[in-house]
Image (cartoon, rainbow, N blue to C red):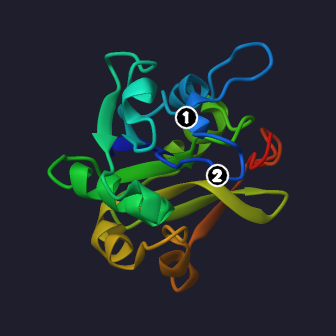
Amino acid sequence: MTSVVGLLLAAGAGKRFGGPKALARDEDGTSWLLRAVQALRPCAEVVVVLGAEAERAAALLPMSVARIRADDWAEGMGASLRAGLLALEPTEHDAVVVTLVDLPDVDAAVVARLAGRVSGPGDLLRASYDGVPGHPVVLGRDHWAGVVEVATGDRGARDYLATRDVALVECGDLATGADVDTR
């Protein structure tokens, strides 16, 4: 049996959005941060990487959710991903499902489909929507160090994944996978 941890990247300042997306709410008051945490509930554990307005965002999280602060969060998504993977290194998890706070229709069904396909620490999986690769992404433990080496700026794992065989898991029947960059 494989153990999969959920990693939510929610550290950015949201410059184009007009503020940290970790603090954003829908018109009905739904917290983006809490919605993204709920999407990761099929995982054995949920870990959130915070940065901009970290204290305010942390106050929204349930006690059952681990919090990591990316001190260099302003560098971009790569810094958040590095911080998360380095914090998970001492754990026993075989793989991590990495998702972003700004994916409003990516829910637990998408994460469950991805997590259900994990077979071990060598896996690389990516949700796709009508054949277009998107998020979440599954990184097996064997790949964590390599991703940490190349994750810079807003590129995250993109360059690493571009040079590897990544299995696409079609999720277009569950969501669009569209991210929100502006209000």
Q: Residues within 10 Å of mark 2 (few under 14, many from 20)?
A: few
Residue located at (30% from left, 41% from top):
68
Q: Is residue 24 above or below residue 156?
A: above
Residue located at (81% from left, 64% from top):
131
Query: Please, what is the three-letter code of the amino acid marked with disc 1?
Result: Ala
Q: Quadrant of the C terminus?
A: top right
Tell me if residue 169 can be seen.
Answer: yes
* Residue located beneath label 1 in the image: 22
Q: Is 127 placed left or right of 45 in the picture?
A: right
Give residue 62's quadrant in the image: top left
Q: Quadrant of the N terminus?
A: top left
Residue located at (64% from left, 29% from top):
24
Q: Residues within 10 Å of mark 1 (few under 14, many from 20)?
A: many
Residue 165 position within the rendered picture, expressed as x and y whole percent measured from the top left: 54, 79
Please report contact status of discs 1 and 2: CB closer than 8 Å, yes or no: no
Q: Nearer the viewer, residue 18 or 89?
A: 18
Between the C-alphas of marks 1 and 2, the distance is: 12 Å
* Residue located beneath label 2 in the image: 15
Residue located at (53% from left, 76% from top):
161
